[in-house]
Amino acid sequence: MTALLNPAPSKVVAVHLSYRSRAMERGRTPPWPSYFLKPTSGLCASGEPVGRPPGCELLAFEGEVALVIGERATRVSRATAWRHVAWVTAANDFGVYDLRYADAGGNVRSKGIDRLTPVGPRLLDARGIDPAALRLRSWVNGELAQDALTGDDLLFSLPDMIADLTRLMTLEPGDVLLTGTPTGSSVVLPGDVVEVE
């Protein structure tokens, strides 16, 4: 993972609920983004097998757009937020639904597990990307499971998320922002192959 992300992230920040389609599934639309922190030990390289924790039966995939910060960001405006993003890549923020009962929104048990969040394999230069024109797709065993456009489905734009976060904390070069998942996330079985683009 360190070969892909250089410098290594000091933190991984994930958004709870950011897509309209997912909010409709959940039956609630948040008025603002909410976040949780993930340990950096949760990251792994794309293509590595993801191990289920002992006793886990409900492992769910969540295809996400991941942003890698390139320039230190503290209290940045929405208008300048995207300038602080160096790279855009794919991520799969797997969650262990069996362990959600004790999380109460913090997601430490269900989403903080070592090597449960594949990232990559390619880093796309953010300077050539319109943050409102990204398409996120996920497949399970070759079947399309998720398909969303950031400009159409996000409740909060990617620059809005960055600006909002940096009111509270400094994002350092290498830090990763997982921007949430659209509808279509579901439980996968041992041996299933999940691809995120």
Image (cartoon, rainbow, N blue to C red):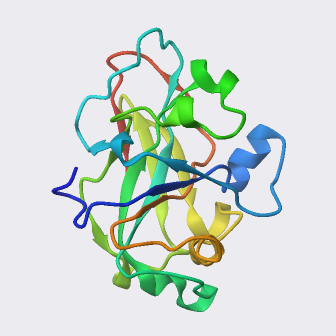
Give whichever of 76, 130 is nearer the camera.
Answer: 76
Label count reads 0
Most extreme residue toward the top is 55
Residue found 15% across the figure and 56% down from its top: 3
Residue found 30% across the figure and 70% down from its top: 124
Q: Position of residue 128 (x, y in %)?
A: 35, 83
Q: Position of residue 159 (x, y in %)?
A: 58, 77
Query: Along the horizontal axis of the image, is 122 left or right of 192?
Result: left
> Image quarter for residue 162?
bottom right
Give the vertical position of 18 relative to 161 (above or below): above
Residue found 83% across the figure and 62% down from its top: 31
Give the vertical position of 93 relative to 143 (above or below): below
Give whichever of 131, 74 is nearer the camera.
Answer: 74
Give the vertical position of 73 relative to 110 (above or below): below
> Image quarter for residue 8?
bottom left
Give whichever of 64, 81 is nearer the camera.
Answer: 81
Query: Along the horizontal axis of the image, is 37 left or right of 41?
Result: right
Query: Along the horizontal axis of the image, is 2 left or right of 17?
Result: left
| Residue 138 seen in render | yes
Residue found 69% across the figure and 46% down from its top: 22
| Residue 185 seen in render | no
Q: Position of residue 56 (x, y in %)?
A: 48, 14
Q: Position of residue 84 (x, y in %)?
A: 43, 82
Query: Along the horizontal axis of the image, is 38 left or right of 163?
Result: left
